[in-house]
Image (cartoon, helix red, strand yellow):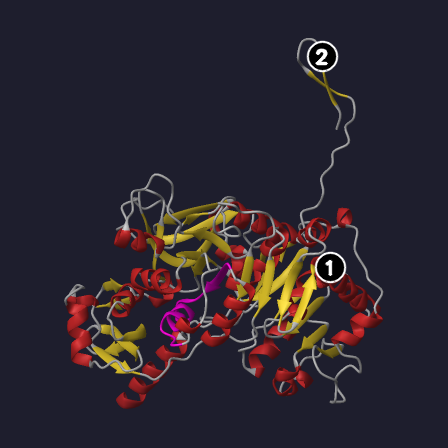
């Protein structure tokens, strides 16, 4: 639009054309290809791809999908560990005008069957390791027209005759015209865990995903230190599965700044340390169980970890003790992050704001908090009537959010969408406090609050106390039935190697630090706790186990 200013300083418009380029994550890769074509953008096992090579592979995937008959809006599913092929899908599927559907590799066959049928997926790309899993449900999924093997050579008759690499080699690269994309159209479809209901498909638009990437970059999460920082220096290790909320956002943020994606198929401390040393990794995201495993691993001291500058802990509540241990033992800054599948995902981080005088333990306490809203996001903590609770870090309420990255809604679930978006805000289901500096602290999920004798008990608060015990490796607190109080807290604990303690000692430890009604009534010890594919403890499974045991005992 050409603007001329007249002598009276009033603008005169002589061309009404407006240049609005649709907001789409495809532009993240287009930028990296143009600005950093010869820089290594992706490292996966022995493979190393420059951004020019990575972009070409994504374009070839798009061409292969179109040649196979993909139509605009078709859902294309991937069942894979973290690898360059899954990362390519985040761009190639969208280039073809289709919708990416990454699958949780830890789901049971009947759960994957539900997701694929609900989404009406057209193609499924699968890693060889998961072929037995797919074999168990494939006949019950009627929308899928072809199964493509990501690695190795197809042997089973139900697989397409050409694998992923063959498809790309034979493909004519295709790049869409981004100016013709509807930025509000569906780009990615992720399914919730279904912890309290059947899984719901979360619809993220091109606009959601692109603006989320910009918000995270502005929040400083792609440049852990600005001193001497130049474009393209960030090296991120993908420790969180790309199908998970803590993982997929980095597919766009790291690309847009020309950073390096370092892929790891399965989390193990030894492999994490090896890759950090070899690739000079700057940053990674962890859930608390992963962070715990790293700081307590005997492999830690065998590697040079000096390149690490930032670790973000999310997916579950952290603790000041864990933040301190990460900083001391891994030698980098550690903060918390907060987000949900429905928010693309990140909406808050907990770095120290300028001008706040936090030191030592106080700094660790605040960096273990949920954090404050990133640019483009508004966060509130509201009571049951939708009113803001006092900013006193005591009053509790539900976290509600609105912003550029909040989902379009739930796939095929208009009633659930309307309920979640009541009043024009997304209702997270997380219960939190907020302080005078607008830092949130999640105290529990609504469904995880323990109601004992009419008193609300935060399981996270009790877990943080248990985690501060020197012998505790990890701990969760769940409700168990009680004849007098309805339900009471119970601690499930894994000890550090060589540590010795008992139930009486841990109960005393809690009672010396918490009000007695909040303390566990009993403790069970485990060698390990059941976890999701991203490392979060399966509280639902544990709750059901103990309630079932109680029910049988009462019969």
Q: Is residue 433 at all visible to an observer of this figure?
A: yes
Q: Is 289 within the magenta?
A: yes
Q: Is residue 159 magenta?
A: no
* Helix, strand or loop for disc 2: loop
**Residue 194 in sight in this render:** no
Query: Gap in Å between the C-alphas at discs 1 and 2?
Result: 47 Å
Q: Position of residue 179 (x, y in %)?
A: 76, 46
- Residue 509, image x, y percentages: 17, 71
Q: Quadrant of residue 457?
A: bottom left
Return the mark for residue 532.
none
Q: Is residue 56 left or right of residue 172?
A: left
- Front residue of 267/136: it is 267
Residue 390 in the image: above or below residue 155? above
Q: Which of the two marks, 1 or 2, is nearer to us in this view?
A: 1
Q: Is residue 189 above or below residue 359?
A: below
Q: Which residues are magenta?
A: 282-298
Residue placed under numbered mark 1 in the picture: 55
Q: Which residue is mark 2?
A: 6
Q: Residue at x 39, y 71 (%)?
A: 301
Residue pictured at 18% horizontal, 74% vertical: 507
**Of the image marks 1 and 2, the number of the one nearer the N terminus:** 2
């Amino acid at each position: 639009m050409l603007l001329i200013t007249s002598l009276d300083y009033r603008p005169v418009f002589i061309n009404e054309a407006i240049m609005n380029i649709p907001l789409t994550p495809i532009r993240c890769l287009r930028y990296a290809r143009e600005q950093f074509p010869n820089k290594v953008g992706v490292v996966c096992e022995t493979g190393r791809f420059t951004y020019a090579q990575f972009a070409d592979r994504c374009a070839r995937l798009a061409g292969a999908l179109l040649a196979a008959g993909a139509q605009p809006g078709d859902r294309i599913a991937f069942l894979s560990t973290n690898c360059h092929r899954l990362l390519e899908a985040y761009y190639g599927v969208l280039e073809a005008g289709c919708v990416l559907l990454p699958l949780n590799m830890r789901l049971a066959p009947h759960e994957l069957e539900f997701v694929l049928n609900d989404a009406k997926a057209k193609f499924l790309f699968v890693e060889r390791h998961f072929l037995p899993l797919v074999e168990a449900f494939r006949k019950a999924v009627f929308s899928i027209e072809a199964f493509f093997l990501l690695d190795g050579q197809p042997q089973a008759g139900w697989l397409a005759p050409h694998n992923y690499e063959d498809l790309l080699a034979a493909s004519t690269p295709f790049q869409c015209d981004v100016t013709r994309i509807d930025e509000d159209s569906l780009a990615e479809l992720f399914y919730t865990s279904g912890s309290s209901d059947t899984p719901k498909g979360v619809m993220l638009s091109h606009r959601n995903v692109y603006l989320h990437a910009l918000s995270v970059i502005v929040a400083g999460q792609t440049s852990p230190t600005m001193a001497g920082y130049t474009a393209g220096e960030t090296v991120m290790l993908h420790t969180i599965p790309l199908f998970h909320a803590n993982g997929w956002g980095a597919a766009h943020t790291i690309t847009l700044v020309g950073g390096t994606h370092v892929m790891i198929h399965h989390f193990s401390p030894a492999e994490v340390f090896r890759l950090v040393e070899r690739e000079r990794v700057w940053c990674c995201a962890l859930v608390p169980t992963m962070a715990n495993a790293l700081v307590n691993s005997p492999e830690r001291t065998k590697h040079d970890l000096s390149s690490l500058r930032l670790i973000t802990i999310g997916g579950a509540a952290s603790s000041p003790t864990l933040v301190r241990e990460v900083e001391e033992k891994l030698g980098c800054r550690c903060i918390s992050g907060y987000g949900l599948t429905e928010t693309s995902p990140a909406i808050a981080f907990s770095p120290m704001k300028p001008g706040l005088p936090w030191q030592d333990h106080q700094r660790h306490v605040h960096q273990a908090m949920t954090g404050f809203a990133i640019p483009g996001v508004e966060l509130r903590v509201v009571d049951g009537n939708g009113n803001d609770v006092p900013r006193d870090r005591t009053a509790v309420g539900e976290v509600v959010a609105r912003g550029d990255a909040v989902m379009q809604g739930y796939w095929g679930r208009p009633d659930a969408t309307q309920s979640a978006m009541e009043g024009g805000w997304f209702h997270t289901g997380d219960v939190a406090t907020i302080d005078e500096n607008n830092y949130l602290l999640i105290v529990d999920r609504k469904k995880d609050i323990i109601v004992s004798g009419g008193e609300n008990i935060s399981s996270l608060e009790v877990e943080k106390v248990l985690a501060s015990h020197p012998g505790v490796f990890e701990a969760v607190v769940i409700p168990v039935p009680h004849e007098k109080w309805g339900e009471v807290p119970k601690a499930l604990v894994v000890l550090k190697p060589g540590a010795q303690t008992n139930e009486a000692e841990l109960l005393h430890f809690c009672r010396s630090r918490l009000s007695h009604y909040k303390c566990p009534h009993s403790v069970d010890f485990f060698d390990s706790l059941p976890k999701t594919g991203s490392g979060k403890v399966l509280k639902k499974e544990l709750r059901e186990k103990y309630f079932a045991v109680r029910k049988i005992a009462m019969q």
